[in-house]
Amino acid sequence: MKTKIGLLYGGKSAEHKVSMQTALAVIKALDHSKFEVHPIYITKEGQWVKGPLLTGPVETVKELEFSQGEALSPTALAPTLFQASEQKGPFDVIFPLLHGPNGEDGTVQGLLELLNLPYVGNGVLSSSAGMDKVIMKNIFAQAGLPQVHYVSFIRGNWETSPEQAYAHVETELGYPCFVKPANLGSSVGISKCSNRAELAAAFEEAFQFDRKIIVEEGVVAREIELGVLGNDYPECSVAGEIVPKVEFYDYKAKYEDGNTALIIPAEITEEEYKTLREMSIKAFQALDCSGLVRADFFVTKEGKIYINEVNTMPGFTPFSMFPLLWKHTGVEYPQLIERLVELGIDRHTQKQKIKHTF
């Protein structure tokens, strides 16, 4: 019997394009003799469209962009959207290949929980907390994980007193600093600031993508990342290093112009790796994660290690850091996908043991 898998991708998010590339890569890597692959496309406008059964790999993103048709909500579609067919019944597992808001932030995970469907990756709490950089950093602080200094702002407060906000950044953090939307990934809307004029422009840019932003102290450090895989007993990959050829690792460097070198394994000491591994697992458990995360760190030349963030649905093409880290650890891309499917089904099975009456 093939495992019936529903691939959920696209999304009403600035990271729609990234999600499409992820879906294309996963479909190419899946063993179609083991999996029955059903695409579910979420358009940029937020419509959910179930595509035809895929009997083999597809070559272009365009083949995964199905016509929108009538706008329907996922709950209205639930009886047909989330099952292979009337004869074959519901999917064995849903694989949400979604990045950013309306997909990686716990919203879709909540829907799947309500429908009692198995799914790959992090649950509602870890997804939402991991998406919001401010909440995530507050949890990490409570867990005792070292971080660079940061402050956050709500759009309304900034609009009321912009100069006060800029002065607060200068007092608490100084320059250089980084301004980021709180609820977005893929380096969208991020700016590095060296003076007041750049800071004001960065606030304007970041607030286009979220009502909340975070400003972080700039540090001179190497960017080291680890992959974490598992549920209750997570394991870590080897460490990798990101070396941008530009000033910082922005969206273009990640996805468009190739101005980035990925060094795997990273040249670090055994003691540094031990610390990074322990911090990765501590962060994973602090957010109650499951399935996968990529844990990102700063390592200074003085040997100080700061956790930057975790990504609960990291870039997932074969050339993205997370799959490459596991490849160098001995887990090839198709095996990694199968392992994640197993972890999603196992977590769902464990949750069915919970009593709901007394």
Image (spheres, rainbow, N blue to C red):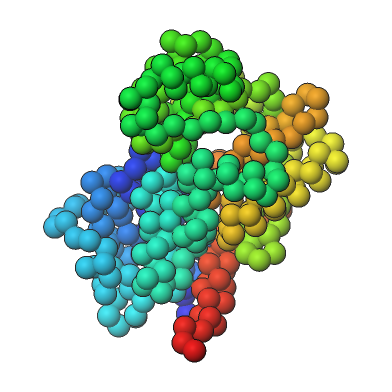
Q: Quadrant of residue 51?
A: bottom left
45 to the left or right of 92: left
Q: Nearer the viewer, residue 268 or 197?
A: 197
Q: Position of residue 72 (x, y in %)?
A: 19, 60
> Count of labels shown?
0
Task: Specify the farthest residue to the left.
Answer: 70
Residue 201 visible in image: yes
Taking the spot 27% from the left edge, 80% from the top edge, the residue there is 86
Extreme residue toward the bottom, this view? 358
Q: Is residue 248 left or right of residue 186?
A: right
Q: Position of residue 297 (x, y in %)?
A: 67, 37
What residue is rendered at 30% in x and 46% in y? 12
- Residue 268 falls left or right of residue 18: right
When asked about the image quadrant of residue 100, the answer is top left
Q: Is residue 40 above or below residue 77?
A: above
Judge whether residue 36 can be spotted in this image. Answer: no
Question: Is 187 drawn above or below residue 350 in the view shown?
Answer: above
Q: Position of residue 131 (x, y in %)?
A: 48, 46
Q: Residue 302, how many percent across, how many down? A: 81, 25
- Does residue 225 sit above or below 95 in this rendering? above
Above or below 342: residue 240: above
Residue at the image point whose x is 22% and y is 61% from the top: 73
